[in-house]
Image: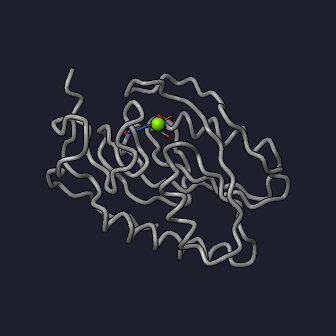
Amino acid sequence: MSDSTPHDTPAPPFGGRSRSELGRIVVPEDELLGRVAALGKEITADYADRPPLLVGVLKGAFLFMSDLARHIDLPVELDFMAVSSYGSATKTSGVVRIIKDLDTDLTDRHVLIVEDIVDSGLTLAYLRKNLAARNPATLEVCSLLVKEGLQKVDPDLRYVGFRIPPVFVVGYGLDVDECYRNLPYVCEYAEPDR
Ligand code: IMP
Ligand code: MG
């Protein structure tokens, strides 16, 4: 597994919200797209004889899933789950709720969970346990981002896009109060009120 190093350049202005909320760019657009393409290639090779069912975790993983799927040269199937672990705060509550469940039966399927970010790892631990109970043939995880040093238990990630410092980030699917998901890069969120 290979990682790339985040950058440290200021974020350009963005839309309606105060741009002062946006801090430094953590992963620029070209690095995101390059790494996602590489992950797609890796997954194509690893799953050549057993096409995977990609399970995207909404909403955060929607852009990553979309780009990743286009770089997997196999007859993949896609499904989505929506879970809530944060409410509107920027710290995890530890409580995970399924808001939308999968449409697909996982029995004997090669399931690859596609996550946006692993922070405390609580959401993923819950998801893994929940999906493992549905008897998939294999169950692996691909997370675009992992925050360094915050997981109490090894999150056991088969594929990782970037390891980043433990700061709150937005963009490329990630939000704060549902905003900034459409930024084409990942940048730090500066929390103006704190
Ligand atoms: P965990 O349960 O603490 O690992 O949190 C995982 C979930 O919280 C992710 O799937 C995200 O939806 C959200 N999250 C964690 N860190 C961030 C962040 O820095 N920005 C935006 N969302 C985050
Ligand atoms: Mg979120």
Relative placement, left or right, of 86 versus 79 is: left
Residue that appears at 36% across and 53% down:
163
Relative placement, left or right, of 181 versus 82 is: left
Give 70 or 152, whichever is nearer the viewer. Answer: 70
Residue 171 location, x and y as percent?
A: 35, 48
- Would you identify the image quadrant in which residue 108 lies? bottom right
Relative placement, left or right, of 53 versus 71 is: right
Q: How is the image coloured?
A: one colour
Residue 165 location, x and y as percent?
A: 29, 45
Residue that appears at 53% across and 42% down:
59
Q: Quadrant of the C terminus?
A: top left
Residue that appears at 51% across and 49% down:
61
Relative placement, left or right, of 92 versus 157 is: left
Ligand 1 shows up in which quadrant of the image? top left
Question: Is 17 located above or below residue 194 in the figure?
Answer: below
Tell me if residue 194 can be seen: no
Tell me if residue 38 can be seen: yes
Residue that appears at 57% across and 40% down:
124
Residue 136 location, x and y as percent?
A: 79, 53
Residue 38 location, x and y as percent?
A: 46, 73
Question: Is 11 located above or below residue 36 in the figure?
Answer: above
